[in-house]
Amino acid sequence: MVWGILVGVIIIGGTILATLGAYSFMRRVTGGDPEGVDRDLASSVVFRISALHGLILALVFAQEMFQYEQLKYASATEADAVADVYFDAGRYDPLAKLPIQKALGEYARLVIEEEWPALATERRLSQAAWNQWDAAYQAVLDLAPANKRQESLRDHMLQQVHVISQQRIQREATVGDSINGIFWVAALSGVVFIALAYYPYQPDRRSLMLIAMFGAYTGIILFFIYAFSDPYRPPAELSPGAFVRLQQQIAISG
C-alpha cells in the first residue's frame, strides 16, 4: 500500500513538474508572447497534439484494463475447473477420489502460498504446482469407469483438467505482457509538447494552476496504466481470491 502511494506520488508529481518545467523553459527561450499573436497557432497545435496524446492514453489504458479483467476471469475459471474436478471425483467413487482430491487440494495451496508470489518475483509458474496438476491428471486418466455415470464424470474431469492447464498458461502469459518502453516515451513527449505550446499565456496563478491540473490528471492516467500493467505487484496487485474461496469450500466439505 505504501509502495503504491509512493509510486503514485512520484508519477503524478513528475508529470506536474514536467509540464511546469516545459512551460517555463519555453517562456524563457521565446520571451513569452506579450502581444498574444501566437495564441491562435499555439491553441491549434495544443488541440492536435492533445487529441493524439489522449487517443494513445485511452487505447493503452483500455488495453491494460482488458488484460487485467481477463486475468481475473482466467483465475476464476481455473479455480472453478479445480472445484469441478475435486467434487466430481467425490461423486465418481469414494476410494478413487482420494489421490485426485489430495493433489488438487495441495495444488490450490501451492497456487496461493507459492505460485502467486513467484509470479511477482520470479515471473514464472511454480513447478511444484505443475507437479500436483500432473498427479491429478494421471489419477483421472487411470480411472476405469464401470458404468455410464462414471464414464460421464471421467470425461468431464478430463475436460476440466485441460481447462486448468490452459488458464495456468494464461496467467503466466500475463506476466510477459508488460508495456513497451516506447509507450512511455510517447506519453511523456505528449505531456511536454502540450506544455510547451502554452508559452503565450502569462504565468499568473490561474494559468499555472491549470497547467499543473493538466499534468496531474495525465499523471493519474499514467499511474493507472502502470499499476494495471503488472497485476502481480503493487499498487494494483490482484489477489488469488478465487483460490482462497476454493480452499474454504474444500475445508467445509471435509
Image (cartoon, helix red, strand yellow):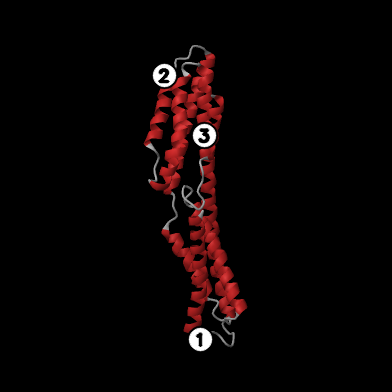
Q: Amino acid at mark 1?
A: Gly
The quarter of the picture where residue 55 lies is bottom right
Q: Which label number is shown at residue 142?
A: 2
Q: Amino acid at mark 2?
A: Asp
Pinpoint residue 113: horizontal percent, then vertical percent. 45, 38
Q: Quadrant of residue 149?
A: top right
Residue type for callout 3: Ala
Query: Can the viewer see residue 140 in this picture?
Result: no
Q: Badge 3 is on which residue? A: 79
Q: Earlier in the sequence, mark 2 or mark 3?
A: 3
Vertical placement of 110 versus 233: above or below? above
Q: Which mark is residue 31?
A: 1
- Residue nearer the viewer, 166 or 118: 118
Viewer can see residue 159: yes
In the structure shown, which secondary structural element does the residue marked by tag 3 occupy?
A: helix
Tell which circle, 1 or 3, labels the residue nearer the N-terminal end.
1
Query: Which residue appears at 42% of the width and 26% of the height?
Result: 137
